[in-house]
Image (cartoon, grey):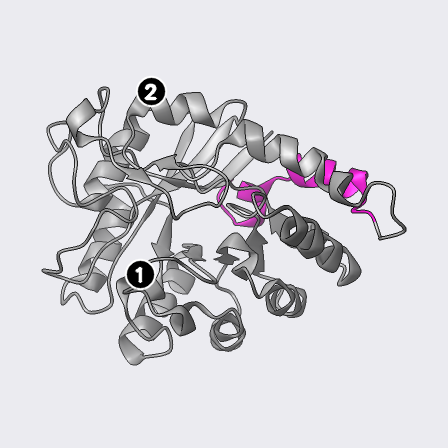
Amino acid sequence: MLIDVHTHTPQYKDPVPADEMVIQDLWRPDRPVAATFSWDDYFQAQQPAQKSIVFGIAWHPGQMTDNISGQGAGDTSWYSGNVNDATATFVRAHPDRLLGFMSVHPYDADCMDEIERGRVDLGLRGIKLGANYQNFDPMETRALAIYEQAQKHGLPIMFHQGTSPVRNAPIRLAYPLLMDEIAMRYPDLKIIMAHMGHPWQVETCVVIRKHPNVYADISATFYRPFSFWEQLVKANEWNVMGKLLFGTDYPVSTVAETVDKLRNVNAIVEGTHLPRVPEDRIEAMLARDSLGLLGLA
C-alpha cells in the first residue's frame, strides 16, 4: 500500500474561484505551485496513493498570517470551527482514504483541551507542529507539555524540519538536532521529521538512526535533484533507509511525480562512478507500512 504521510487540508470543497487562486513561486525552484486547492484537486494529486495523512497549521492565537499551510483563508462554508474541524470534516467524508492529524499552538491557553477535543471528539490521530512557522521554541515548557500528552495518548507528532522561504519563520527553530533532545526526553513518542530536515539531511540521518521511534519523510525534496540523490545516498550509508517514509507535502508536489523521481533518482549520476541508491530500497519505501510503524494501523 502506498501511503502519503504528508499532505495539507484543502481550503475549498468546490473548485477554487479564479479570483481566489493563490500561486506560490518560492515553494519549489522548478515551477510555481497553486497554494489554494479543492477536494477534487487534492484527490487527483494523491493518485496512486491508497491512504494519506492530512493536516493544517494552528497559528498563534489572534495572529494574522499569509496562507502558508492552506488554512486561514478560503471557503469556510463546508465546515464550522477551526483548522482541526476542517481537517476532521474532510477526513470524515473520505474515511477510507484519509487519516487526520490536528495542529495546536503551545501559546494557546486552550491547547491541552484542544488536544483532547481533537483526539476524542474529532477522531484525529496525530499532531502537526511547525515551530518555525508557529514561532515557538520547541524546547520551552509549553511545547514540552504537548509532547508529553502526545506520548501519553499515542499521538505521533510530525515536525516541520529544515529551511523555509517564509521570511517570518525562524529557521533555527526547525533545526533537526533539536529532535534528538526531544526524543531523549520522550522515548516512546513517535516523531516524523518532515522533508528529511533539508538542507541538514545528515543531521536527520543521525537522529533517526539513534532513536527507534523517530522517522523522517522525504516530502518536497526531489525537485533539487542533486540534493535528493545525495540525501538518499547518505541515508543508505547511514543504514536508515528503513526509517524513511513516503510523503509529498501536497500541494507542493504530487504522489505521481514523487514516485517517478524516486524511481529515477540515480539518473543524475548515470555514466559516473558515483554511488547509486539501491533500487530495492526505493521500492521498499514505496511499499512501507508507515501507518503501522507510527502505531496508526
In 3D space, how far apart are the residues under numbered discs 1 and 2 (Cα atoms)? 27 Å
Q: Does residue 202 sit above or below 277 in this rendering?
A: below
**Label 1: how many residues lie within 10 Å, few (<14), some (14-19) or many (20+)?**
many
Q: What element carries label 1?
A: helix
Q: Position of residue 35 (x, y in %)?
A: 31, 37
Q: Does residue 202 sit above or below 21 in this rendering?
A: below
Say whether residue 95 is visible.
Answer: no
Q: In this view, does 143 lie to the left or right of 269?
A: left
Q: Is residue 287 left or right of residue 215?
A: right
Q: Is residue 91 left or right of residue 89?
A: right
Q: Position of residue 58 (x, y in %)?
A: 23, 54
- Magenta segment includes 32: no
Toward the viewer: 13 or 127?
Answer: 13
Q: Could you tell me which residue is drawn at 9 percent across and 60 percent down?
A: 62
Say whether residue 90 is visible.
Answer: yes
- Image quadrant in which the N terminus is located: top right
Magenta-highlighted residues: 276-297
Q: Do residues under tags 1 and 2 come within 8 Å of each other at their CB atoms?
A: no
Q: Position of residue 79 (x, y in %)?
A: 15, 32
Q: Which mark is residue 175?
A: none
Residue on which the image places disc 2: 40
Toward the viewer: 108 or 30?
Answer: 30
Q: Could you tell me which residue is drawn at 13 percent across and 56 percent down?
A: 64
Q: Which mark is residue 133?
A: 1
Q: Which amino acid does label 1 sit on?
A: Tyr
Q: What element carries label 2?
A: helix
Q: Does residue 167 sit above or below 11 in this rendering?
A: below
**Label 2: how many residues lie within 10 Å, few (<14), some (14-19) or many (20+)?**
some
Quarter of the image for residue 288 reads top right
Compare marks 1 and 2 and give the one earlier in the sequence: 2
Q: Could you tell me which residue is drawn at 54 percent across and 23 percent down?
A: 48
